[in-house]
Image (cartoon, rainbow, N blue to C red):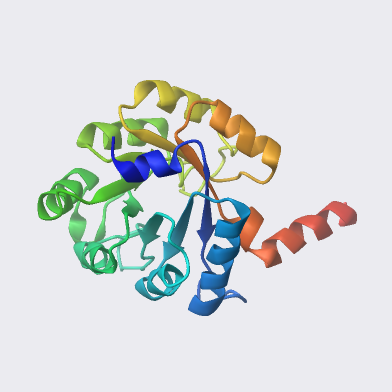
Amino acid sequence: MHAVLEQIKNGLIVSCQALEDEPLHSSYIMQKMAYAAMLGGAVGIRANSVKDICEIRKEVKLPMIGIIKKQYENSEVFITPTVQEVDALVETGVEIIALDATNRIRPGGQKIQEFFEEIRGKYPNQLFMADCATFEEACFADKLGFDLVGTTLRSHTSYTNDAVIPDYDMMKRLAVSCRHAVIAEGGIWTPEQLKEALGAGVWAAVIGTAITRPMDITKRFVASIQK
């Protein structure tokens, strides 16, 4: 078993991301978010962009899941969509690279199988995580040889937008069906939900919005008193 996977086993990975149109968009702020998460007991960090990853690395020595979000024409895939983003992430030394592993067509007309074969051939020792939306996609990614498979995109695609998350049933099925580490991600808002996710047999869990997006957290509280 890879040492990095052992480090994150049964733990909480905190996603520290803020896009350009969000109030906390700043590599410095993401560094402090990640540092606070480390002090709070997180076993890993998920971060977006080379700049954020490099800034976080200055103060945080936890394993990191790195992504680059980039939009391309004629493709819905935007999480680490091409080899160009993979190359940039490898240069940072990030332990795990996550990418969209749905059945959607990637930029340039690529399908996930040919894309993964290309990057695995180029970087045989890099850990790769598959961000999936369905049970079938995750199982396919597992068979392709992804080191980790996640429920990241559940409810975030046109064909799963009515799915209820956290999807514990999907987690349980994947934990039994997959050879590689299963990561629970998406819709976990409370300690109780985190405990239930880990109880479903997954390797580890990622929480982002509920910890690192105060605007969304505030909206959730305000909505509760406006009903």
Please determine whether, in this image, residue 80 is positioned above or below residue 55: above
Percent coordinates x, y for residue 173 in the rendering: 45, 23
| Residue 216 x/y as whole percent | 68, 62
Q: How many marks?
A: 0
Q: Nearer the viewer, residue 141 or 45?
A: 45
Q: Determine whether 67 is above or below 55 in the image.
A: above
Picture residue at 34% right of the left edge, 36% below the top: 137
Quadrant where the N terminus sits is: top left
Any part of residue 102 in sight: no
Query: Quick check: can you spot residue 202?
Result: yes
Front-most of residues 23 and 26? 26
Give the residue at the far top of this rendering: 176
Quarter holding residue 8: top left
**Is 59 displayed left or right of 4 in the figure?**
right
Residue 102 position within the rendered picture, expressed as x and y whole percent measured from the top left: 34, 45
Which residue corresponds to the image point at 45% horizontal and 37% vertical from the top-left?
9
- Please, is residue 104 above or below residue 86 in the view? above
Q: Is residue 198 above or below residue 51?
A: above
Q: State the residue lying farthest toward the left.
A: 121
What residue appears at the point 47 percent right and 56 percent down from the top-left corner?
Answer: 45
- Apparent side of residue 118 relative to residue 226 in the rendered image (left or right): left
On the image, the x and y values in percent for residue 171 come to 49, 30
Image-based side of 128 in relation to 224, left or right = left
